[in-house]
Image (cartoon, grey):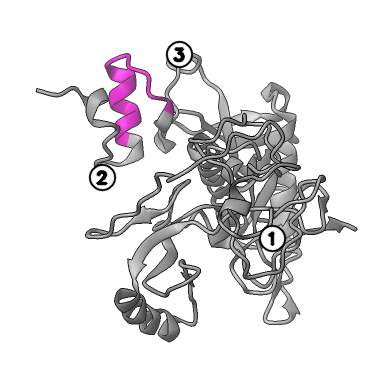
Amino acid sequence: MATAEARGAWCVPCLVSLDTLQELCRKEKLTCKSIGITKRNLNNYEVEYLCDYKVVKDMEYYLVKWKGWPDSTNTWEPLQNLKCPLLLQQFLNDKHNYLSQVKKGKAITVKDNNKALKPAVAEYIVKKAKQRIALQRWQDELNRRKNHKGMIFVENTVDLEGPPSDFYYINEYKPAPGISLVNEATFGCSCTDCFFEKCCPAEAGVLLAYNKNQQIKIPPGTPIYECNSRCQCGPDCPNRIVQKGTQYTLCIFRTSNGCGWGVKTLVKIKRMSFVMEYVGEVITSEEAERRGQLYDNKGITYLFDLDYESDEFTVDAARYGNVSHFVNHSHYFPREP
């Protein structure tokens, strides 16, 4: 029988609650990083987030959610015992944001009680804390899955929306059943300097796509032919740009204008620089037509034609894709001239 390692990682939905899993792990003295049980907190208590606040006999108390422990073990702790300044600041920020939020164009007026929080305020703070944890886990997962240099950050300062539930990060095109993508190169160059010699683009009858600064110099719609595994040039070849993936640190963020998730850069990008490749599931044009009608009804689309010379295949990044899945009309790429 083949081992699990040989088959690859398998994911099976679990119907048991997180609290139950954590209790079972602690009972059996087992660690599981994915549910917050580590050697550090297996028998110790570490503050995960703060849930509520009250004042009793002039002493401030916070309701603490302990990392890796179920909600049933939450306890009220005096402020003087808490050594988590960042979590305390997040608690106060979330409280302030809730009390000052705007609903239907009118400010919500909630009296700030210094003795105890209103249930609605505490509920919002807990939801925000859980969202923050979920987004951090998603960010960690994205950076584990990516195979390029650029880091990926996730940010939501707008609402309580968490990670998308039906999106799977991929680095390369994913052919749908019945579709075969031939990626093997038929020829390669033997250049010592691909920028000056007759390289792969010239063999294909087109111009080299990049200038000395690795910026794209050919018109939009022109195919890009890069060096490949058959070429004798190395990884520093000036004609190997797209294949290296995203080199910039990008942030998937929640837009404030109702357009869902967007993408912004955290560094300056020079004009005409390659940023990312549109990756997704490769489907036939017939299937794209069917999905397109469904997407039109929802007011969304992730379909792009793949081929340069024909329209046989289409890329659909609705469920499978990379950072480009989140690019929309709200994205912002500050650039240098």
Type of the residue with mark 1: Tyr
Which quadrant: the C terminus?
Answer: bottom right
Disc 2 designates what residue? 13
Q: Main secondary structure of the magenta part?
A: helix
Of labels 1 and 3, the one closer to you: 3
Q: Residue 189: percent from the left, percent from the top?
A: 57, 39
Q: Tell whether 184 sits left or right of 127.
A: left
Residue at x 75% of width, y 54% of height:
273
Residues at circles 1 and 3 in contact by the CB criterion of under 8 Å: no
* Residue 330 can be seen, yes or no: yes
- The part of the image, by quadrant, that contains residue 224 is bottom right
Residues at circles 3 and 2 in contact by the CB criterion of under 8 Å: no
Q: Residue furthest left?
A: 1
Query: Judging from the image, what secondary structure is the residue with disc 2 in?
Result: loop
Disc 3 designates what residue? 39
Q: What is the C-alpha distance between the residues marked 1 and 3?
A: 36 Å
Residue toward you, 156 or 70: 156
First in sequence: mark 2 vs mark 1: 2
In the rendered image, the vertical position of residue 34 relative to residue 41, given as above or below: below
Q: Which residues are magenta?
A: 20-33
Disc 1 designates what residue? 98
